[in-house]
Amino acid sequence: MSARPEGYIPAAGEDWLLPLYDPLQRFVFREKHLRRGVLEHARIGPRSRVLDVGCGTGTQAVVIKRAHPDAEVTGLDGDAKALAVARRKIAREGLDVRLDEGLATALPYPDARFDRVVSSLVFHHLSDDVKRGAILEIRRVLAPGGVFVLADFGRPVSWFERLIAPRLNQFEQARTNISGGLRDLLTQAGFAVDEAPLYSMGFARVWCWRGARA
């Protein structure tokens, strides 16, 4: 297992919370809406090569492989314990999904390796410098014409979300998300970006950004 860099946040925030990760995803983060939204925006074609960055316990990778059995699906995460859960989940499903341990800022893949890259509810854990580094790495491993689908917290829409937004802005890593700055980071890295709100969690809005590699 590789050493975690300073400031690294594991999948559940703390290692001891890992057994609660999947239940929290289902009930707090309204996981069905999240996974379906990522899948729909990815528009995965036949025999596509798909990478899930920050795959956690592997749920999105499983959803993609179920929907597209002929796709080559790879999940990557820096949390070895979450990957162990993902491996058990994938084995129970009888699916062929590759899982790798690594960081978004140093993807262990050659240039233009994937047709689609997805990432969900990861970027609000990252500082802006790490966000930029991860986006550049994702662009590097995308084939020309490839697409990056990013789902995460974004600008508030409802009055209650706007009420809560100043409290979320107290967390440095989330400020760019809440201010709507993720689109700018993607554009600066060379993506042509479409964005749309996916759903509300009540206290925050989850958005989806679809970045095409020119």
Image (cartoon, rainbow, N blue to C red):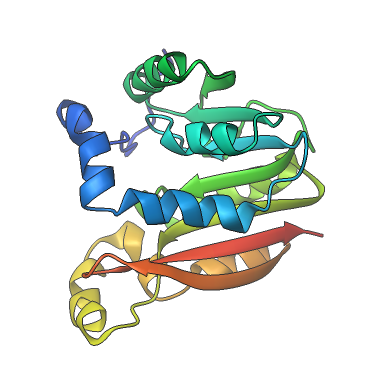
Q: Left of 113 or right of it: where is 18?
A: left
Q: Quadrant of the N terminus?
A: top left
Q: Is residue 60 visible?
A: yes
**Residue at the extreme bottom of the image, as rendered:** 159
Q: Quadrant of the C terminus?
A: bottom right
- Residue 157, horizontal then vertical, whole percent: 35, 82
Q: Residue at x 48, y 52 (%)?
A: 36
Q: Residue at x 31, y 38 (%)?
A: 9
- Residue 148, horizontal then vertical, whole percent: 64, 52
- Residue 21, horizontal then vertical, whole percent: 24, 36
Most foreground residue, 75 or 173: 75
Q: Residue at x 25, y 61 (%)?
A: 171
Q: Left of 199 or right of it: where is 70?
A: right
Q: Place residue 33 in its image quadrant.
A: bottom left
Most foreground residue, 187 or 7: 187
Q: Is residue 130 visible?
A: no
Q: Left of 177 or right of it: where is 100?
A: right
What count of labels does the image hold? 0
Q: Residue at x 39, y 21 (%)?
A: 89
**14 to 101, vertically: above or below:** below
- Residue 79, horizontal then vertical, whole percent: 37, 26
**32 to 12, vertically: above or below:** below
Q: Place residue 167 in its image quadrant.
A: bottom left
